[in-house]
Amino acid sequence: MEGYVLIALKSIAVYVFIVAAIRFFGKREFAQLSVVDVVFILLISNSVQTAMVGEDASLLGGLVAAMALFLMNFLFKKIITSNKSWSKAIDGEPILLIYQGVLKPAGLKEASLTMEELEAAIREHGVEKIEEVNLAVFEVDGNISVLSENYRKISKRRRGGHRIIGNNTA
């Protein structure tokens, strides 16, 4: 039993580390996953597996690690929804990118976005020029919300979206 408690504690430590690392290196990565991002996620999960379960490759050891991760995820979500300061620390805050047609370079830098990415995002929302945008915000989930036409047209779309691979139209 002592070994399984150690597996649970290691799994919790890895979970907290990964959440902190993602927060530190930016949420932008999850708005649109590229091939590099998917490979990164797969390699991270593979690299921390041994740190969590050690030599215990048993089914029970894996289930204990998974249960510890599920519990930590549940606790983090409870903390985020019940405590505004913790939510701000874990999820961050929305970042102002454009206000009344004026670009906010500090926001662009803070969100780690290029001008080309911002322009593409506002075009995805049906707006041609930055000057036509009333408000653009980089949300905590990595999406960009755009308000235009005197705040009447509100659109929030996931950057990128799902691509269909191949011609699977059957």
Image (spheres, grey):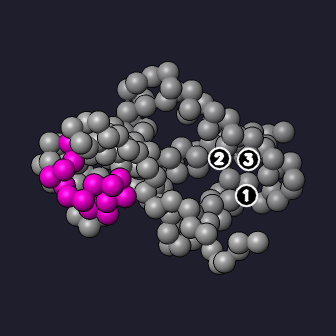
Task: Work out whether 61 lies above or below 150.
Answer: below
Q: Residue furthest right?
A: 59
Number of other residues with Cα within 10 Å of mark 2, as a class: few under 14, some 14 to 19, many 20 or more? many
- Give the residue displayed 21% in from the left and 38% down from the top: 150
Task: Work out whether 131 lies above or below 99.
Answer: below
Residue 65: which disc?
A: 3
Q: Secondary structure at mark 3?
A: helix
Q: Amino acid at mark 2?
A: Lys
Residue 10: which disc?
A: 2
Q: Secondary structure at mark 1?
A: loop
Number of other residues with Cα within 10 Å of mark 1, as a class: few under 14, some 14 to 19, many 20 or more? some
**Mark pair 2, 3: CA separation:** 8 Å
- Can you give x and y, in whole percent of width and height, for residue 120 in the image? 32, 63
Q: Amino acid at mark 1?
A: Gly
Residue pointed to by mark 1: 54
- Give the residue displayed 73% in from the left and 47% down from the top: 65
N-terminal of the two: label 1 or label 2? Answer: 2
Q: Nearer the viewer, mark 2 or mark 3?
A: 3
**Mark pair 3, 1: CA separation:** 11 Å
Image-based side of 114 in relation to 24, left or right: left
Say whether marks 2 and 3 touch (CB < 8 Å).
yes
- Can you give x and y, in whole percent of width and height, for residue 87 in the image? 43, 31
**Mark pair 1, 2: CA separation:** 9 Å
Q: Amino acid at mark 3?
A: Ala
In this orientation, which residue lies closer to the viewer: 117 or 78?
A: 117
